[in-house]
Amino acid sequence: MADVFTIPPARTPALTSRLPRVGTTIFTVMSALAAEKNAVNLGQGFPDFDCDPQLVDAVTGAMQRGLNQYPPMAGVPVLREAVSAKLAALYGRNYDPGSEITITAGATQAILTIILAVVHPGDEVIVLEPCYDSYVPNIELAGGTVVRVPLTPGTFRPDFAKIRAALSPRTRAIIVNSPHNPSATVWTEAEMLTLQSILAPTDVLLISDEVYEHMVFDAAQGQFHQSAARFAGLAARAFIVSSFGKTYHVTGWKVGYVAAPGSLTAEFRKVHQFNVFTVNTPVQHGLAAYMASDRPYLDLPAFYQQKRDLFRAGLENTRFRLLPSEGSYFQCVDISDVSDLGEADFCQWLTTDIGVAAIPMSAFYGDGFDQHVVRFCFAKKDETLHLALSRLARL
Ligand SMILES: Cc1ncc(COP(=O)(O)O)c(C=O)c1O
C-alpha cells in the first residue's frame, strides 16, 4: 500500500488541444530566421522607427500624475470621447462614448472578444481569404464553423457571388478587413454598398477590421477609407475594430477600440469584462491627450505613401511584378519571373541567401493556396528600405 507520506512523482496532465492545428506562426518563424541570418526584416508588420516623443510624454505624464489604477471597464471616458469625435468627424456617424465605444487591449483582443460574445456553437462565420491569422482560431475557440470564401486570386477584390452563395441561415457574422492585410487592397464605396445590400435582408453581423483605417493612399485620385461607419445599413450591424498601435507606431502598446450599436456593445462588454476587464490606464490617458490633435492620423497617409512610393520605385528594378498597394503598410509582389520555388520556400531562400525577409501569401490561407505572391512590410525607416532594395536589386 502506498504510504501517504511518500511524495508521488509530479505529473503534468496531458491536454487535448482546443486548437490542434495551430502551431508557431509564420511571422515568428520568419522573424527568427531573419534575426539568425541578419536579414532585413520586411516580414512581420511593425515599424522599426519610434513613435512621436509627445505621445511618450503624454503617457509618462499620466503615470506621473498617478493615473495608475484600474480605469472604468469600458475605457477612460476621455479616450472614448476622443474616439467618438474622430468617428463623427471622419465618417459622419455618432457613437455614444458611454454605450457604444469600448477600449480594448489591441484589435486582436477586440476580435476574439466579439467572436466569443456573438458566436454560438454551430454558428457559421464567413472569412474572406487570405485573412489575418487570428480569425480562424478565434471562431474555432467559440465553437463556430469557419466558412472560407476566397477573395479573387490576382486582384484580391471581394467576389460577391461567392459571398452570397456562402450565406446560410446559420451565418452569424462575416469578417471584412479593409485596408487589407496581406493584399493591401482597399474596399471601394461600390463594394461596401454591395455588401450592405447583400446583408440587408439578413441578421448577419459585420466584424469590420479597420486597423489600417488611416493608411489609405492616393487621396488625390479620390481614394479614402470606406469605414463601415459611413453606411447606415452596415453600421447598424457592425462591430468596427481599430488599433492605436497601427495608427501611432506603437504596436507594442496593444490598445485598440470597438465601436458598435448599444445592444451589440452590451453583449461585447459582458465578455470583455471577464476577459481583460480593463486596459492600461496611463496609456489610455496619454492617447486621449494626444488625440486632441487630428494631425497625426491625418498626416499618416502621406507619411506611408512616401515609403510605399520609395519601395515600389526600387522594386521596379527587379523582376518582381508589383501588385497595387492601395492601403495598409504592405506591398505584395508576384515572384513568378524571379523563381520557380513555392512561396514559403522562396521566403526562406530570400531571407537566407538575399538577406531580406518576406511573408508568403499562402500563410493567410487555410489550405496554403500558393499563387506565387509574397508580402513585404514597408513600415520601416527609409534607410532600412534602401538597404533591403540594394539586396533585392540582385533579383
Ligand atoms: C488585419 C489585422 N487585424 C488586427 C491586427 C491586430 O492588431 P493589434 O496589434 O492592435 O492587436 C493586425 C496586426 O497586424 C492586423 O494586421
Image (cartoon, helix red, strand yellow):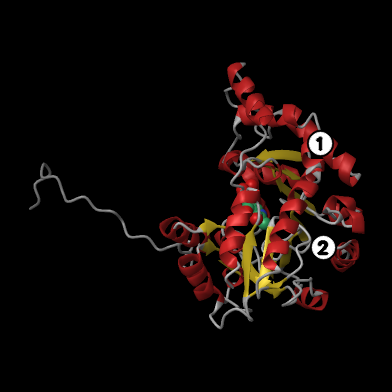
Q: Is mark 1 within 8 Å of ligand 1?
A: no
Q: Secondary structure at mark 1?
A: helix
Give how far across and how far down residue 324 sits, in percent.
77, 67
Mark 1 lies on residue: 295
Looking at the image, which residue is at 87% across and 44% down?
Answer: 90
Give how far across and how far down residue 184 sits, in percent.
73, 62
Q: Secondary structure at mark 2?
A: loop
Give how far across and how far down residue 65 sits, in percent.
62, 16
In front: 190, or 343?
A: 343
Residue farthest to the top, as pictured = 65
Report if residue 79 is visible in the image: yes
Looking at the image, which residue is at 65% across and 30% down?
Answer: 53
Q: Is residue 262 above or below residue 389?
A: above
Q: Which mark is residue 187?
A: 2
The numbered mark, 1 or 2, whose residue comes first in the sequence reads 2
Q: Is residue 112 above or below residue 351?
A: above
